Image (tube, rainbow, N blue to C red):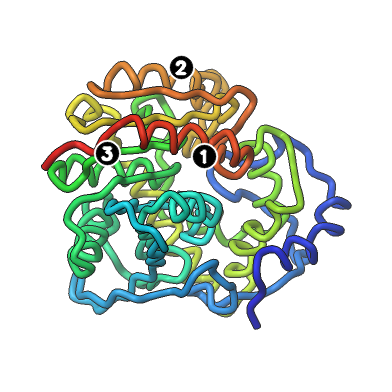
Amino acid sequence: MTFPRRLLSMLFAACAAALPLAAGAASETGAGPGSGPGDAGPAYGPELQGFAYPAPVHRFSFVSQGQTLQMAYLDVQPAHPNGQVAVLLHGKNFCAATWEGTIGQLDAAGYRVIAPDQIGFCKSSKPAAYQFSFQQLARNTHALLASLGIGHETLIGHSTGGMLAIRYALMYPDDTRRLVLVNPIGLEDWKAKGVPSLSVDDWYARELKTTADSIRRYEQATYYAGQWRADYEPWVQMLAGMYRGPGKKQVAWDSALLYDMIYTQPVVYELGHLQMPTLLLIGDKDTTAIGKDAAPPAVRATLGHYPVLGKAAAQAIPHATLVEFAGLGHAPQMQDPRAFHAALLKWLVATPPQPQ
């Protein structure tokens, strides 16, 4: 059975309000240690079967690394098109569906919106063995867009999707007319700063402990700067449901492979090569840093300072505009959608796409 997010918000509001939500108690590695067998809620399949998306889900079938894979994506076409395409790239603990509010705003402004679930995430294939890299995910996304006849786009990436957007823009600069980075991770090199390496097995063991409570605590502390609202709860259950479902081990394994990809493939050293107009939208209360909780205290104190990271990125990227949101965390598009979308649309209007 599937449920619209508004109904899910109503269903989860009461229980969410009653739960103890201690800001700062969550792991910085992702969901982190959970509450154990007491976790209850909907169970979804390994490809998020049973969770409703805000638009029809399409599937792009392609062969990669000797496997036939399915990439799920949304393709929202506006009633009054402006001739432009926006491609939305989700973060590590997000899906295409979590762009729901942004899709609506861009659709109303005349954009055709493409929002894929990357391989290893959400409604897309979870291969048992896959060499995950940002280059591979960029190639997959480029192949999807080519299959749709799209050869130039405005790329909007959030969190891990921001790292992917940077890699995509570096690989396909002629196709990337404009670049928008929403609290992207990867603006620092955690390994070089002293965050210790975790094996894929270590990541896997951590991911198997994921529960709704651990996700909620982490998101409250990091995504929403200590705040919580009932409309955040469906996104908690979206993730937690896959860890309650029959594909839990495969979901956790792919997630572990993806964390290893993020840790080992920095993009910060290449920001100066981005030549397209770039918008940085930064919630300044964000503290995200992969593996932060595994680092020594002295190292941990140096990580995830987004007011500093955002300014440094804006200086490194040649044609960058920085917009900071005081008091917002890692997901400003969800925490304060009105301010976020006003800033996004204002920049899109004022900044013509880079000519081909």
Query: Separation of disc 3 and disc 1 at Cα?
Result: 16 Å
Decide if residue 212 is on the left or right side of residue 12: left
* First of labels 3, 1 by sequence position: 3
Residue 295 at x, y = what percent? 51, 30
Can see residue 191? no
Residue at point 40% right, 29% down? Answer: 280
The residue identified by callout 3 is: 178
Q: Which residue is mark 1?
A: 341
As measured in the structure, the alpha-carbon distance from the residue carrying label 2 to the one carrying label 1 is: 23 Å
Q: Would you call the spot at circle 1 few (<14 residues within 10 Å), some (14-19), or many (20 or more)?
A: some
Q: Which residue is mark 2?
A: 308
Residue 140 in the image, given as x and y percentages of width and height: 24, 62
The outermost residue toward the front is 80
Looking at the image, which is closer to me, 212 or 182? 182
Mark 2 or mark 1: which comes first in sequence?
2
Going 23% across and 77% down the picture, which residue do you hit?
Answer: 67
In this orientation, which residue lies closer to the viewer: 204 or 68? 68
How many dots with numbers? 3
Label number found at residue 234: none
Say what amino acid the circle numbered 2 marks. Answer: Val
353 left or right, relative to 341: left
Task: Compute the Cα span from label 2 to label 3.
Answer: 23 Å
- Looking at the image, the residue that sits furthest to the bottom is 1
Quarter of the C terminus within the rendering: top left
Instruction: Specify the amino acid type for callout 1.
Output: His
x, y percent for residue 35: 74, 56
Q: Is residue 188 left or right of residue 274?
A: right
Most foreground residue, 295 or 317: 317
